[in-house]
Image (cartoon, rainbow, N blue to C red):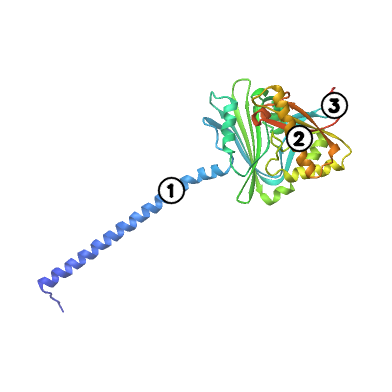
């Protein structure tokens, strides 16, 4: 049976249908817009992932640095050099090693296409490490590091790194992040051909495993080499986090039959005599602090050298303080 509507009702029905279609079109457009926004957001997030990953692994490369080698390995053990190259039993190796348990090692070799010298490149990386939570394990520059050929071949096993001794820099640091300990070793060198290279090792493992690493304490270093640099500032005050190390050292010194020199160095503005006097004051300040920790008074004597035995790093820091076994010279085999 056919149904007929009045013209007015027919018009109203038509308008209702058109309104529904318009609403559907608006809803469809809104949904499409949301899809586009979501898609763009996902694309942006995906594009940002490499940058985030790079920021969390190692350091920002020097400008105009091209990657020449990049490798990643899982190791059962890893060693980090924490001392200069020196000759032991006719073999040239780092003075000290920090041995760590299993973790992930990333190695990257960069060639720097820049007229900037290795000093400027080194400062680029050091600026990134001026932040809380960074612990410097060891650093050296120029001839203070020892021979470049041994860093290249014995330490890193990358012959490309063999360069000019006076243009080399090495830095080893530890930083902690989200329950992980990250160890970064950085070596910068310029070859005789004028080519400049930056080599970076980035080693990561859970922080609760780091205590399993084998790092010699101060007294063990002293027994091995006859001397050790102390974790104190040029003015004789303790470095942050050094209290327990020095407390253990005091206990070990008291149990030892040996006696020692506390050798102090100061650099800066002033005459030689003024700097010698300042280094004497630094030694007295440190010795008093160690005696308060229980050090026997007769164990240590102060030798203040002021500016008379400079090294590149100690000049930058204003000085250094070392502990040296008395009659240390009698242990040195000059023929080697």
Q: Residue at x 33, y 55 (%)?
A: 32
Residue with the mark numbered 3? 329
* Rendered image quadrant of residue 190: top right
Disc with the residue nearer the chain's start (2 vs 3): 2
Tag in front: 2 or 1: 2
Residue with the mark numbered 2? 284
Q: Residues within 10 Å of mark 3 (few under 14, many from 20)?
A: few
Secondary structure at numbered mark 3 = helix
Distance in Å between CA atoms under marks 2 and 1: 63 Å
In terms of depth relative to the viewer, which is nearer, 202 or 331?
A: 331
Q: Residues within 10 Å of mark 2 (few under 14, many from 20)?
A: some
Disc with the residue nearer the chain's start (2 vs 1): 1
Vertical comparison of 42 with 163: above or below: below
Q: Position of residue 165 (x, y in %)?
A: 68, 23
In terms of depth relative to the viewer, which is nearer, 290 or 134?
A: 290
Which disc, if any, is residue 43?
1
Q: Residue at x 27, y 62 (%)?
A: 24
Q: Is there a contact, CB below 8 Å, between mark 2 and mark 3?
A: no
Secondary structure at numbered mark 1 = helix
User: Residue placed farthest to the bottom in the image?
Assistant: 1
Q: Residue at x 84, y 23 (%)?
A: 334
Distance in Å between CA atoms under marks 1 and 3: 66 Å
Q: Can residue 237 be seen in this snapshot?
A: yes
Secondary structure at numbered mark 2 = helix
């Amino acid at each position: 049976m056919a149904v007929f509507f009045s013209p007015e009702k027919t018009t109203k029905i038509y308008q209702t249908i058109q309104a529904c279609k318009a609403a559907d079109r608006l809803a469809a457009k809104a949904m499409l817009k949301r899809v586009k926004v979501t898609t763009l957001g996902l694309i942006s997030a995906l594009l940002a992932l490499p940058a985030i990953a790079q920021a969390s692994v190692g350091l920002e490369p020097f400008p105009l640095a091209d990657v020449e080698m990049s490798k990643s390995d899982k190791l059962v053990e890893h060693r980090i050099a924490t001392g200069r190259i020196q000759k032991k039993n006719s073999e040239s190796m780092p003075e000290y090693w920090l041995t760590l348990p299993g973790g992930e090692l990333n190695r990257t070799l960069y060639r720097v296409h820049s007229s900037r010298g290795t000093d400027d490149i080194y400062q680029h990386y050091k600026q990134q490490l001026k932040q809380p939570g960074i612990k410097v394990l060891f650093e050296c520059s120029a001839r203070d590091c020892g021979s470049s050929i041994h860093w290249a071949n014995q330490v890193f096993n990358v012959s490309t790194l063999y360069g000019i001794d006076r243009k080399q820099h090495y830095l080893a640091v530890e930083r902690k992040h989200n329950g992980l300990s990250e160890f970064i070793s950085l070596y910068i060198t310029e070859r005789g051909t004028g080519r400049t290279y930056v080599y970076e090792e980035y080693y990561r493992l859970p922080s609760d495993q780091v205590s399993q690493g084998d790092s010699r304490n101060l007294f063990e270093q002293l027994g091995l080499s006859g001397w050790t640099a102390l974790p104190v500032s040029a003015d004789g005050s303790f470095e942050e986090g050094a209290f327990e190390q020095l407390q253990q050292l005091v206990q070990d010194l008291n149990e030892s039959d040996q006696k020692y020199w506390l050798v102090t160095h100061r650099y800066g503005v002033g005459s030689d005599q003024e700097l010698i006097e300042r280094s004497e004051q630094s030694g007295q300040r440190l010795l008093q602090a160690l005696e308060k920790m229980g050090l026997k008074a007769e164990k240590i004597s102060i030798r203040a050298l002021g500016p008379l035995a400079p090294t590149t790093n100690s000049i930058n820091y204003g000085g250094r303080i070392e502990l040296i076994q008395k009659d240390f010279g009698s242990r040195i085999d000059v023929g080697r």
